[in-house]
Every structure is written in structure tokens, then in C-alpha cells.
Amino acid sequence: MRSLLPFQLVASDLDGTLLNAQHIVGNFTIETLRKLEQQQVDIVLATGRKHEDVFSIVEKIGIENIQIITSNGARIHDLSGNLLDKNDLPADLALDIMNTPFDKNKIFVNSYQDSGWFIDRDIPQLAKYHQDSGFTYQVTDFRKHDASGTEKVFFIARSQADLLDLEQYLRHTYGTQTEIVYSSLNCLEIMNKEVSKGNALKKALANRHYSSASCLAFGDGMNDESMLDFVGKGCIMANANPALIKALPNLEVIGHHAHEAVASYLRATFNLI
């Protein structure tokens, strides 16, 4: 059956892409992915989320052939939770970034690390993004923090405008040592050099001896650019960051994540009934 399939592997971002407007995986999408599994298509979830947060989504989907790329490519896990690949920020560099000066009235800082999710103050509204998993943060003083095992450091603000000065400083100070990207319009993320969804997906494809042409991918943020540009067919969500559409003008723009457009596209592409 594989040789007759249009693609051997499907990779998808989560927030703003595979997840619906309530930040959960919808029943139509779950049913579609299960049908895809029956056709022996491999599935990769590639997200900025932490792997502990993603496992509950995978359990809800209920299929066995998923691989998980998390923290924008800093970690790759299999379905059993086995770590397949990692690329951390050096601890001293991560700590410096965590303590970068910024306007605390407009911005707050987070880190994903082996020991959990850390944040500089309590922001209860973040819970809406983690309804399936219940994954939550620990408030910490980053001046006294243990920065070992840091997957990424990220800064969240009310708008991208509030992050522009900080972005310029980070790129000037740490640009040669890190990868800096917007996962959404108001979230700026910093990973170790060479960490990206695209590079992680290349490793996932190599393990299966697939070519890039055999992969179909979906995304909506600038952290998806490397992945969408690498695969045989990249699709951009209608709700995507306009900068992503501008950066990849030749890619197809499909429907809105709130309407579970990825699932609809998969059904049409693979003739799923």
C-alpha cells in the first residue's frame, strides 16, 4: 500500500494547526489520523510544546506510529517516551538569556528544561493552552535558577511590538550561538544553534530512510518555516503568521485550524472516507 500513497509521512505543528480553537485535538481530526494510520502512513507531531505536554494529546489520538518533535526540535521522542535526540542550550548561556533585561510590565520569561516548565511570575490564563494535559509551570527566580537541561527559553508579551527591542538585543548578543524564532506573534523563542523543526524532521526521515519528497507537512508559525520548506509538500494555515506566508510564497494556503482544516486536507489527499 505504501508505494501507492501520495506521501509516506505526515508532519504537523499543533497550536494553530492541528489543534482547534479551544487548543485541543478535535474528534474529526482524531478520526482522520486513525484512518491515516490504517493506511500505514507515519505521523510526526512537531511542536514548540514540551514533550510531557504532548503525550496526553497523543494518548487522546490513540494511534501507535507517532513520533514527537518538541521544543521546536530540541527533543525527539518515540511514542513510548524514549528520548531519541536532544540539543540543549549550554547552561551558562541559557542562564544569561533567562536574565536578559526586559520590560516586566509587558513581557514575561519562561524556560523548558528537563526538570519542568519555569516562569518568572504567575500567569493563570496560560492554562487554556494545556487543557488536555494539565501541564503547568513553576514560578522561579531566574537570578538563582539552575539552567541545566534547557531545551529553550521563551519570552511572551501581549503583542509582537512589545518584543521587537528585546528581539534585536537577543539577535545582536546571542545570534551566532542560538536559533531565535517567533512561534506565534507574541512569543519569541531561543534554542541552541541548529535546533529547528526542519533539522529534527530530517533526522526523523533519515531513521525511516524516507526522502523529503515523501513527506507532507502543515504549520502556521515562523518556527514551522524550516520544516515546511524542507518537505515535498508544505501547507500553510489560513490563520498563519503573515510573515510565514510571505517567506514561503509558493506554498499552498489551506483552511483555518478552528475548522480542523488539516484533517479535511488529509482526507482529500489520501482519499479517506
Image (cartoon, rainbow, N blue to C red):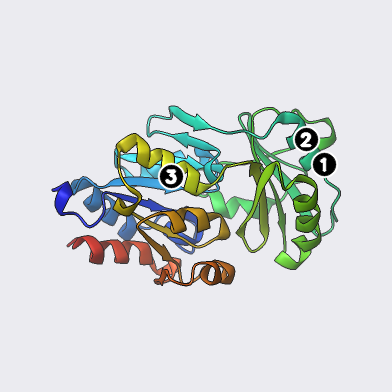
Which quarter of the picture shows residue 136?
Answer: top right
Which label was assigned to residue 95? 2
Q: Secondary structure beneath disc 2?
A: helix
- Badge 2 vs badge 3, beta-carbon distance below 8 Å: no
Disc 3 on helix, strand or loop? helix
Of residue 40 and residue 193, the one placed in the foreground of this image is 193
Which amino acid, mark 1? Asn
Q: CA distance from mark 2 to mark 3?
A: 28 Å
**Figure disc tally:** 3
Q: CA distance from mark 1 to mark 3?
A: 31 Å
Q: Residue at x 77, y 50 (%)?
A: 170
Name the spot of residue 235 as percent of width and height, x first. 40, 64
Q: Is residue 159 visible?
A: no
Q: Are marks 1 and 3 in contact (CB under 8 Å)?
A: no
Give the residue number, with chain letter if any, for mark 3.
201
* Numbered mark located on residue 243 in the image: none
Q: Is residue 239 left or right of residue 9?
A: right
